[in-house]
Amino acid sequence: MRVADLLKGKPDAVMMVEPTLSVEALAARLRAARVGVMLVSRDGRSLDGIVSERDVAYGLAEHGATLPVLQVADLMTRTVITCSPQDTVAEVAKVMTLRRIRHLPVKEGDAIVGVISIGDVLKSRISEIELEANVLRDIAIAVR
């Protein structure tokens, strides 16, 4: 299975925020959208960074009461690891595990076409394992 297959079951809209947005507004948007990450873009097309609920939690530990007035740019990860729709789910699972990240933006050329989460990857892997188990069970029954 490929990343493109994972994207088929997800909304087309990619959640983006501006780097100048306040962390307080970011937290409200994360909550309203019920997501754990948003991509950061100055112009709505380029990928300037990524910011997650974990970044907000770490920011609270570092900045305390001043956190809500800081900007997304103060918390975001600027070096963003991405994947492509042609990557296999196994490949992105390995990257996510080795890099200890839970979300990967999906880029096709320069365009951002989606975001996949570790949850998406796990659901896919579970489905593949269940299918393999069913096939093996059917083979075992047929051999008897």
Image (cartoon, rainbow, N blue to C red):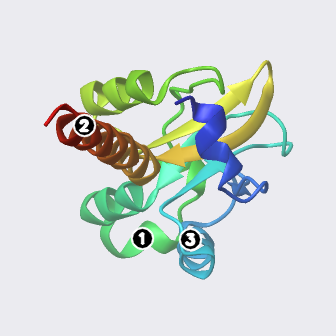
- Taking depth in this image into account, of 107 and 91 the one nearest to the observer is 91
Q: Position of 74 compared to 128: left or right? A: right
Q: Amino acid at mark 1?
A: Thr
Q: Position of residue 126 (x, y in %)?
A: 32, 48
Q: Quadrant of the C terminus?
A: top left
Q: Considering only order in the chain, which callout, 2 or 3, is on the residue closer to the N terminus?
A: 3
**How far apart, in angstroms, are the residues tagged by discs 3 and 1?**
19 Å
Name the residue located 50 percent from the left edge and 26 percent from the top edge: 81
Q: Residue furthest front?
A: 144
Q: Residues within 10 Å of mark 2 (few under 14, many from 20)?
A: few
The dot on residue 142 is: 2
Q: Amino acid at mark 3?
A: Leu
From the image, tell me which residue sits under label 1: 66
Q: Considering only order in the chain, which callout, 1 or 3, is on the residue closer to the N terminus?
A: 3
* Badge 1 element: helix
Q: Which circle, 1 or 2, is nearer the viewer?
A: 2
From the image, tell me which residue sits under label 3: 30
